[in-house]
Image (spheres, grey):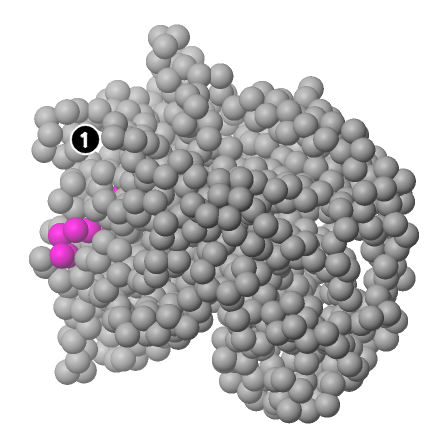
Amino acid sequence: MTAEQARLVEVQERRVPWKLWGPYLSERAWGTVREDYSPYGTAWEYFPHDHARSRAYRWSEDGLGGICDRRQLVCFAMALWNGQDPILKERLFGLTGKEGQHGEDVKEYCFYLDSTPTHSYMKYLYKYPQRAFPYTRLIEENGRRNRSQPEYELLDTGAFDGDRYFDVFVEYAKAAPEDILIRITVSNRGPQPASLDLVPQIWFRNTWSWGLDVRKPRLEAGAAVPAGCSIRVSHYDMADRWLCCQGRPELLFTENETNFVRLFGAANHGPYVKDGINDYIVAAKSNAVNPELFGTKAAARYGLHVGAGQSVEVNLRLSLNFDSEPFGVSFDKVLRERRREADEFYETSAPKNLDADERLIQRQAFAELLWSKQFYNYNVRRWLRGDPAGAEPPRERLCGRNSGWTHVNNADVVSMPDKWEYPWYAAWDLAFHCIPLALIDPEFAKEQLLLLLREWYMHPNGQLPAYEWNFSDVNPPVHAWAVWRVYKIEEKDSGRRDRGFLERAFHKLLLNFTWWVNRKDSEGNNIFQGGFLGLDNVGVLDRSGILPNGGVIEQSDATSWMGMYCLNMMTIALELSKENPAYEDVASKFLEHFVYISRAMNNIAGQGIELWDRKDRWYYDVLHRPDGTSSPMRVRSLVGLIPLFAVETLDSELIDTLPGFKRRMQYFIDNLPEFGDHVETVTTPTNIRRFFSLVSRDRLQSVLALMLDESEFLSPYGIRSLSRYHRDHPFILRLDHNEHTIDYQPAESQTGLFGGNSNWRGPVWFPINFLIIEALQKFHYFFGGDVQVECPAGSGVRMDLWQVSLELQRRLTRLFRRDERGRRPVFGTMEKFQSDPHWRDCLLFFEYFHGQDGRGLGASHQGWTALVAKLIQQSYMARDREMQA
């Protein structure tokens, strides 16, 4: 057992709280729903970036490469000033939803380079230009461009020309759970010496200004230490601690209070406000900070002069104990040990035969996930009604956004999709995060899955909250799938079968499944209408809105997700039946529901309407008009591939031990002839294997023929979300004398649906590709070499479905790997990232990828793309199996 694995055991057994502190500080709290108190939900405009330095946040805090405790009472982060910027760099900047060509968009370069699961060691990198940061230029130039033009990025502004920038590395190492060593290294990459104010900051989340608890914590200058100074951190709800600062920095103190004078022209509550440190450093206002050296926000100002190509180190230590020698020999020793232990942990947990590039990709993918944990704080009832010390919120809010979710009262550390672009949890993103997390920290993965099922998240009616902007939106029901996969990953890696976790999740998932059946099968036909279901612009119409003709879309994808959900729940119930026969009946119920869904997809309401189009041999959504007529919406998209996900195989080795389930399964096979199209049986001398799938063997061949066609879905880097066929053959739907069109767009969406931040019209997405790979492996488990297809279609190369899955894994991981020219497709034409030794190994895990050339697009730190870590793991196992064969 490595040192990090031992720490994980100590956390699991609740002996040592190694996770008490971590990277739980957001990269953005402004522009969020929680901070929006406008009448009509204009979050970006109500709390813009320009307010962030001057306005106290109500619900959470943000900072640059920062950390905080699990309750975010105390926060630490760095700030920077290059002597040119109009403001102190305290947080990442980006465009708002309306300013960006394709929605919100961060315009900075930061990288999560390393982290262990307990955050005993972490490393972060921020690249800071030595020129004035081009805030206005980024807004204005992107505002001039339309949706069809490329986005204007920070590199395009010339901010990094001539390598005139600083690399600012932040390392955290824990000597104990509440003894955190901090090293900030500033490297001047430019050709000339340059100056920089490095301003590490510590502050309290403002909990005292809202009339709920007026007790105020306190920061004050502490006793001197050898080779440094200190700040005493006193909070009424936690033990005192000290931030020791090496050297002789200037200590600055102010209050984490809103500057009403600057923002609203009203009187301040006191002379010292949130942006006091900014005004003292940037505007040279000597009266902006407290000369008595106390407050609720403090900083240590280091004036650094860094030679060309040189580096300067600054050490700090945040600890419960006042150490008379905080920066002695032990400081460097602990830092070295934690780095070594992090290397040891990942060396042990990674497959042995990975090459250096694969190890780098996998390790940074894990770091991406681990750094994306965030303290998420949102009490909807309090948010709607307002605080005692504040003005009464506009009445419109009581019937507006999230007003039906007053039970939500979140104050937990949660895995976020992206700490800047999506600094709030999303139900289906989180499910995908838990798959790679289970490889390194299965307990945290399980905790996260159970968390969203708790009473302060899940709606009393059983719905899971989608995301902060609209909890009532519907995400694909992948939670049961994730629960089962995490359970099996842990069993495979450690031999542990955590039935307690499985059973707890299963009971709550029963409520969610019932919600789907009661709320999303509007006509009781076992055909579902989930709305946009995470696929945004993949449809020709806004599937979450009211259709122009008042009709209903019978969704192939929603129905298929539910078929998958049935089989996931059946599988979990069968596992639980091994020790409790009562679950046999429940397993039968889910098999029954799968039967009805499979039947309905081929004969909706007994009217002969199918989601499978016999002419095109593809699954489509069906538009059901008010006059009773129906027609398929012939868009070749992921909608036609999601039926592949509803697939499962049962062996007689299991079924023979469950006579009740076996008997009821046979009843369906004997009495529902059409069910036979979705069940196949293979008998061997020792086993009877039954195969359940929405996609029959015959249809599978047709679906894969299109999916593996490079002129349709198959790109060099995975499966596209929309067929390339629609580039030259747009689909046009005419309704009420209006035309609605969808065409193939390999990069960002050029339509304004869903605020313009909807990009499913052609790019490659990791989560769907991951599920396709898994489905192919399940099909192969049953069919073996009996089913082979051309891959790519028309190439003459035939593969079984296992080999096809490996080919897709290779294409997806190829996005990040250096090719024969040493270039990574993910970075496209960004030459700095391709050739500069200080950039080329700093990876970004984008939200989605160009359908032709593979370059990264959308959010740059999207957690679900860390699934590449799991794909690398699987690819190694396949290679190992081939070598043994």
Q: In which quarter of the image is residue 836?
A: top left
Depth order, front residue of 108/229: 229
Q: Which residue is drawn at 18% across and 61% down?
A: 743
Q: Name the residue under label 1.
A: 791
Q: Which residue is drawn at 18% across and 69% down?
A: 741
Q: Quadrant of residue 837?
A: top left
The vertical placement of 519 against 64, above or below, is below
x, y percentage for residue 646?
38, 43
**Residue numbers of the magenta segment:** 718-727
Q: Quadrant of residue 32?
A: bottom right
Depth order, front residue of 164/181: 164
Q: Please tell me whether residue 57 belongs to the stretch shown in magenta.
A: no
Q: Which residue is drawn at 43% across and 39% down?
A: 838
The vertical placement of 198 against 715, above or below, is below
Q: Residue furthest top?
A: 884
SS of the residue under disc 1: loop
Query: Badge 1: few (under 14), some or many (20 or more) residues near its Cα, within 10 Å?
Result: many
Q: Where does the C terminus fall, quadrant-wise? A: top left
x, y percentage for residue 443?
66, 37
Q: Where does the N terminus fall, quadrant-wise? A: top right
Q: Is residue 470 left or right of residue 448?
A: left
| Residue 287 appears in the rendering | yes
| Residue 812 appears in the rendering | no
Depth order, front residue of 626/309: 309
Depth order, front residue of 533/267: 267
Q: In this view, does 872 lie to the left or right of 260?
A: left
